[in-house]
Image (tube, helix red, strand yellow):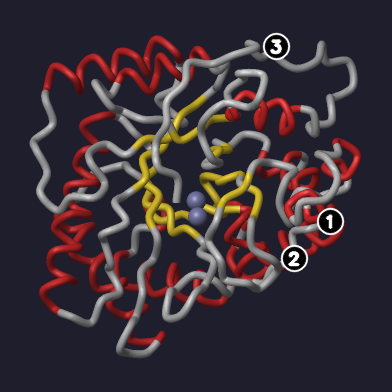
Amino acid sequence: MFGSHLSIAGSMCNALTEADALGLETVQVFTKNQQQWNVKPLDPAIAREWVAGLEARGWADRVVSHASYLINLASVQDDLWAKSIDLMTVEIERCEALGIPFLVHHPGSFVGSTLERGIDRIASAYAVLMKRTAGGTTVLCLEGTAGAGSQIGGPFEHLASLRAAILQRTGLPHRVGFCLDTCHLHAAGHDMSTREAAEATLTAFDSACGIQHVKVLHVNDSKGKLGSHLDRHEHIGEGWVGGGAKLHAGEGTFSAAALKRSGFAAVMNHPHFRGIPKILETPKGVNEKGVSFDTVNLRRLRGLVAKAPGSGGTRPVPATGRLRNLPVQ
Ligand SMILES: [Zn+2]
Ligand SMILES: [Zn+2]
């Protein structure tokens, strides 16, 4: 099921309406201004409208929230760590109130300390979070990162150790999953540039972490090369994952044939990924024909999905979507 990160400007439900206009099957949102520590309480009327909107679309099992980038659960600075736990608590509570099953967050950064200490801080933070939100059902999804500097979550061993440490502290396996991002994988040094390489990468992930724990995918092409640790998202088929390396260097044009041989073909046809939310976080805006980039990127991805024998084909995609510019990391 395909989705995109959409803006909640105006009202939460605007993201649902825009998702409809784009022909999406799910959506990812920030449930509040992601750049602020201070959070206004959720308006109960807006929450009711949102929940009704999810029910009307049958999306209660698949919508995704992305936590604020301010949060660093790995911090060894006590004040930042405590603030991060407080804000993460709010993130979880909002997901519970809004019926959002998946909350994606970046593991954190151990700046000024060690990886082991950073992982221990995150596990300790989870112990507090799980106590504060006891009985909740939101699945917290640790996102794989591009692995720059002291960022945790580039190597698969980080993610595996982290989930194990969290489970040891909380005993709640059903509340801890993963989110994989195709751009981050490649930038972190896991080759996603060809179908074969990506299949091998996913097999390695499965051995280290268990692919069944991946609850959400972020499908983004990568401006950065393999192992560049650069977290910059590119349109599908125009970066180093989707066979668009030359295009990115200013040569040639988008090639559907190159995209078909790329890592996206492996991701789109992996049996575990069929039934999970696949979210675009690619740049917004419109192309030279006035077609929204989300529509363009979705068409490219949907074109990679091998049709099951006897199936009637894929859902039609509207030619244009309503436009909105929002900052994309
Ligand atoms: Zn992502
Ligand atoms: Zn990213």
Q: Residue at x 83, y 15 (%)?
A: 311
Q: Position of residue 43 (x, y in %)?
A: 11, 25
Query: Disc 1 marks which amino acid?
Result: Thr
Q: What separation in Å lies between label 2 and label 1 (alpha carbons)? A: 8 Å
Judge from the rendering whether residue 45 lies leftward or rightward of residue 18; answer left or right: left
Sequence order check: which comes first, mark 1 or mark 3? 1
**Residue at the spot of label 2:** 191
Residue 270 visible in the current orientation? no
Query: Disc 2 marks which amino acid?
Result: Asp
Query: Disc 3 marks which amino acid?
Result: Pro
Element assignment for label 2: loop
Q: Position of residue 68 (x, y in %)?
A: 29, 51
**Residue at the spot of label 3:** 316
Q: What separation in Å lies between label 3 and label 2 (alpha carbons)? A: 32 Å
Could you say which disc has been placed on residue 194 in the image? 1
User: Few, some or many C-alpha atoms within 10 Å of disc 1 (few <14, some 14-19, many ≥20)?
Assistant: many
Q: Residue at x 22, y 54 (%)?
A: 88
For the N terminus, give its image quadrant.
top right
Q: Position of residue 323 (x, y in %)?
A: 47, 21
Q: Marks 1 and 3: CB-CB under 8 Å?
A: no
Q: Residue at x 28, y 67 (%)?
A: 72
Q: What separation in Å lies between label 1 and label 3 (alpha carbons)? A: 27 Å
